[in-house]
Amino acid sequence: MSIKDLAYYQKLIETRSYTKTAKFFKLSQPSISAAVKRLSEEFGAQLIIQKTPRGRFIVTPAGKILYDRSIEILNLLETTKNEVAEANYPKLRVGVSPIVGKIYLAKILTELSKEKLNHNIEITEAGSNDLS
């Protein structure tokens, strides 16, 4: 199974259009159809029912499950890529006195978390004599 096929499938379900999906990925419509066919074969289930070649399609119950899981899988893949890339950066070790920690650190960490910049920060709370 190809991750790209899952991305094509997810976009197809969201746009409800082979044409829009193909344009989004700069592919041909048959490429999108082939991806859906490969996924159907991989999972042994019909994912989409389409009565006419240019007509609307219906997502089957199996197709809905695959769509929902494709969102989770593709999001997890993106998160994993980011975490692996961040693992190459050294951790920033910040020593903070208890007073500063209570007053300022919570605000700073909240902002870093919003920007997803807190993964490589290690915080140690101790008195100034112990922070060397």
Image (spheres, rainbow, N blue to C red):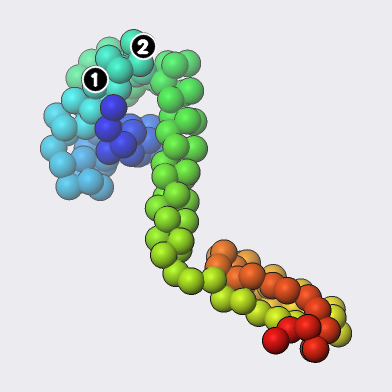
| Residue 8, disc | none
Q: Which mark is residue 37?
A: 1
Q: Earlier in the sequence, mark 1 or mark 2?
A: 1
Q: Secondary structure at mark 2?
A: loop
Q: Which residue is depicted at the point 48% across and 23% down?
A: 65
Above or below, 105 relative to 13: below
Q: Position of residue 30 (x, y in %)?
A: 14, 29
Mark 2 surroundings: few (<14), some (14-19) or many (≥20) residues within 10 A: some
Residue shown at 69% from the left, 72% from the top: 123
Q: Amino acid at mark 2?
A: Ala
Q: Position of residue 93 (x, y in %)?
A: 61, 76
Secondary structure of the residue carrying numbered label 1 = helix
Which of the image's four quarters has the C terminus? bottom right
Using the image, determine if residue 15 lies above or below residue 113.
Answer: above
Which residue is under mark 2? 45
Residue 107 appears in view: no
Query: Which quarter of the rendering shows the N terminus?
Result: top left
In the figure, is residue 120 to the left or right of 99?
A: left
